[in-house]
Image: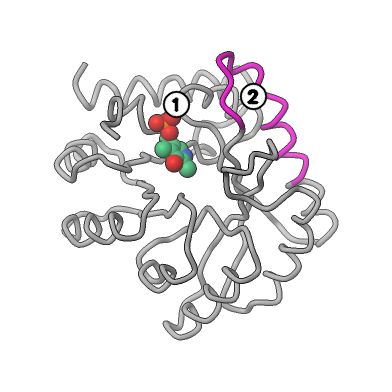
Amino acid sequence: MGECERLQEVLSRIERACHRSGRDPKEVTLLGATKTIPEEVIRKFYSCGLKVYGENRAQEFLKKYEALRDLSIDWHFIGRLQTNKVKYLIGKVSLIHSLDRESLADEIQKRAQKAGKVQEVLIEVNLGGEETKGGVEPENLKKLAEYTLSKPNIKITGLMAIPPYKEDPEEVRPYFAELRKLRDDLERDLGIELPHLSMGMSHDFEVAVEEGATIVRIGTLLFGERKY
Ligand SMILES: *Cc1c(COP(=O)(O)O)cnc(C)c1O
């Protein structure tokens, strides 16, 4: 299958998952997760119509950002974010998916203010209690959200999660449902709107869409197995 066919295949699977769950496919954004994927491959997918991409590492992002400046890519940052890397992202990424601690909110505020921007962020939640993964613990989510709300140059627009890997994607469904519930509770408790749920990857995105995902982050299924 060529690049454009692979893209169409993923888009129609998203569409079918939307129809199964009574959702409008327009509510779901496909994000190409491009860590380790070369710039030429991104160019090809861009020409097929994929405009939103997410990177995990600041240095790799910067390199691709510069090399692909002639395209109107909507870049997101989806990886674990070191505080000292925030300065490279502000003004270049429309959404940071991985706010998970107060010190990071402090740094985003500082850098966004300096640049005269309001940075959109998602709060990443660690649903599986996995120590190797980023994300705030669900019990500390409200506190972090309240803290971030006090930052005038940050706008929280939703939640993100990377649930534990399960062979059977149906076993991931409870995690996606939990993220949605956390979002609903937070909206009610804080009186804010959180339209975005960034959840679902190559092996489980259809279940995520059925549970309300508005951004699915797909790597392998679009770009093939990563080399490292
Ligand atoms: C790599 C990555 C993805 C995509 O994973 P695939 O299983 O290859 O689709 C999604 N989200 C994050 C945060 C990633 O690091």
Q: Residue furthest right?
A: 189
Q: Quadrant of ligand 1?
A: top left
Q: Tell me the amino acid under the disc marked 2.
A: Val
Q: Which residues are magenta?
A: 164-182
51 inside magenta stretch: no
Image vertical order of residue 31 relative to residue 146, above or below: above
Q: Mark 1 vs mark 2: which is more N-terminal?
A: 2
Q: Residue furthest bottom?
A: 114
Q: Residues within 10 Å of mark 2 (few under 14, many from 20)?
A: some
Q: Tell me the quadrant of the picture where the C terminus can be found.
A: top left
Q: Give the percent coordinates (x, y) of residue 59.
A: 30, 60
Q: Which residue is mark 2?
A: 172
Any atom of ligand 1 within 8 Å of the CB at mark 1?
Answer: yes
**Res 202 label:** 1
**In the drawing, does residue 144 fall left or right of residue 28?**
right
Return the residue nearer the eye: 181 or 127.
Answer: 127
